């Protein structure tokens, strides 16, 4: 079948500019699928022209061999981490993958989610949504006397004094504890707490130099000076630690389900109440997890999982990047189900998720910046057949 180049070029242009109607989007996909099976040269030429017209210089398009085209398009990860695609395992012509992947690669500007277990990619009409903005540096510091300081609106510089510690808010949104050399050390430790709301995150440098990253809806409670035999803090939610080394004072993290003991290391703890399990993922060093009636020591690249029955297991070969993606400003999913994804979205966008009808079991693999609006994340997921709408502070999910 021969299709006029001008027609597909026209549809490409409208698709890239996000001005295509639902009928035009459907026509574009239909033509691409027909060309993928019947006119290889025309398809390759049109994709090459579209690639050039979008000036996608950081993505390689090589039309010399079919397997090279497939490799370049479906496995290209641009330098700005826009997209990472995983092909579905179906017996379908590679040219259809090329056609579909090329459209999405060229149209996307901030990310993409690709899905498994779906036979056809169906175009979805653009729907004007209410929206939810991404989270940011938001947290509340509660001092030992009960005074609360809203950190996102507090001035930079010294914002409080606790014992012999000066509490500084830096220009880049960190909270740093520094010892006031003009004040004698005190034996009484004052307890401070930093808590992030849904839609918030924050970074802290504790009195011993330990660096702490708080994800949304999380908290850390700690003394203003570590004067005892150990350094003990308590957390809720999800927190990443880079613990300052001190062999004489173990660093202990307490959650409502377990304790993690370290000397100096980098690790992530996910202990949200709405998650089925607590996960401790180690990036560097060694940690000991005690939960239920068991204790485990894990090595870098391993993850300790404490389930609802207080059973503690260790898993190896963990995708560490996925576990700490939130700290690096990304949503990163690897064979994740929709409920797991939406729990993260709920905390980050400060919205509630409501499911309507039976939600089928599907797995999603992909990544997208956490700086995008909620509607942009949802629009990516819509290509799986998922319908989502935002109404006020609610996201409604249906299939």
Image (cartoon, grey):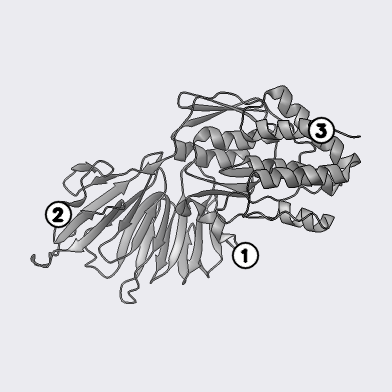
Q: Earlier in the sequence, mark 3 or mark 1?
A: 3
Q: Earlier in the sequence, mark 3 or mark 2?
A: 3
- Label 2, on which residue? 161
Q: Residue furthest front?
A: 6
User: Element at badge 2?
Assistant: strand
**Where is 143 relative to 299, above or below?**
above
Q: Which residue is mark 1?
A: 317
In what element is the residue under mark 1?
Answer: loop
Q: Is residue 92 visible?
A: no
Q: Quadrant of residue 185?
A: bottom left
Neighbours of disc 1 within 10 Å: few (<14), some (14-19), many (20+): few
Pointer 3 residue: 31
Mark 3 crowdedness (10 Å alpha carbons): few <14, some 14-19, many ≥20: some
The image shows residue 258 at horizontal and vertical percentages of 44, 56
Question: Is 237 placed left or right of 344 in the picture?
Answer: left
- Between 198 and 67, the residue placed more toward the observer is 67
Is disc 2 in contact with disc 1, using a CB cutoff of under 8 Å? Answer: no
Q: Position of residue 131 (x, y in %)?
A: 48, 28
Mark in the foreground, 3 or 2: 3
* Observer-nearest of 297 and 77: 77
Q: Which circle, 3 or 1, is nearer the viewer?
A: 3
* Position above or below: 2 against 236: above
Evaluate whether residue 207 shows in this view.
yes
Whether the residues at callouts 3 and 2 have beta carbons within 8 Å, the answer is no
Which quadrant is home to the C terminus?
top right
User: Judging from the image, what secondary structure is the residue with disc 3 in?
Assistant: helix
């Amino acid at each position: 079948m021969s299709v006029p180049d001008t027609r597909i070029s026209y549809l490409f242009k409208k698709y890239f500019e996000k001005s295509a109607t639902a009928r035009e989007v459907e026509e574009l996909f239909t033509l691409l699928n027909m060309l993928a099976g019947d006119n290889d040269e025309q398809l390759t030429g049109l994709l090459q022209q579209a690639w050039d017209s979008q000036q996608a210089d950081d993505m390689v398009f090589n039309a010399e061999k079919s397997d090279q085209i497939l490799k370049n398009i479906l496995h290209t990860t641009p330098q700005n981490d826009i997209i990472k695609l995983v092909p579905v395992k179906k017996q379908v012509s590679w040219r259809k993958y090329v056609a579909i992947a090329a459209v999405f690669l060229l149209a996307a500007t901030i990310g993409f989610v690709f899905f498994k277990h779906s036979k056809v990619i169906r175009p979805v009409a653009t729907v004007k949504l209410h929206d939810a903005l991404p989270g940011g540096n938001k947290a509340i510091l509660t001092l030992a006397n009960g005074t609360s300081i809203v950190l996102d609106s507090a001035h930079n510089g010294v914002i409080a004094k606790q014992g012999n510690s000066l509490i500084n808010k830096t220009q880049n949104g960190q909270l740093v504890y520094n010892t006031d050399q003009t004040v004698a050390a005190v034996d009484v430790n004052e307890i401070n707490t930093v808590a992030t709301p849904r839609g918030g995150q924050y970074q802290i440098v504790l009195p011993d130099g330990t660096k702490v990253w708080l994800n949304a809806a999380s908290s850390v409670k700690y003394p203003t000076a570590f004067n005892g035999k150990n350094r003990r803090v308590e957390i809720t939610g999800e927190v990443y630690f880079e613990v300052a080394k001190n062999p004489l004072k173990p660093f202990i993290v307490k959650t409502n389900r377990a304790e993690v003991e370290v000397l100096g290391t980098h690790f992530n703890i996910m202990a949200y109440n709405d998650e089925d399990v607590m996960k401790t993922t180690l990036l560097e060093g060694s940690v000991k997890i005690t939960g239920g009636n068991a204790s485990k020591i894990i090595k870098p690249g391993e993850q300790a999982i404490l389930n609802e029955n207080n059973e503690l297991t260790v898993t190896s070969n963990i995708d560490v990047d996925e576990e700490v993606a939130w700290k690096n400003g990304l949503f990163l999913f690897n064979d994740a189900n929709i409920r797991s994804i939406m729990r993260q979205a709920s905390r980050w966008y400060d919205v509630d998720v409501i499911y309507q009808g039976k939600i089928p079991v599907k797995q999603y693999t992909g990544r997208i910046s956490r700086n995008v609006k909620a509607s942009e994340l949802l629009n990516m997921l819509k290509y799986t057949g998922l319908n989502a709408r935002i109404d006020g502070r609610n996201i409604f999910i249906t299939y």
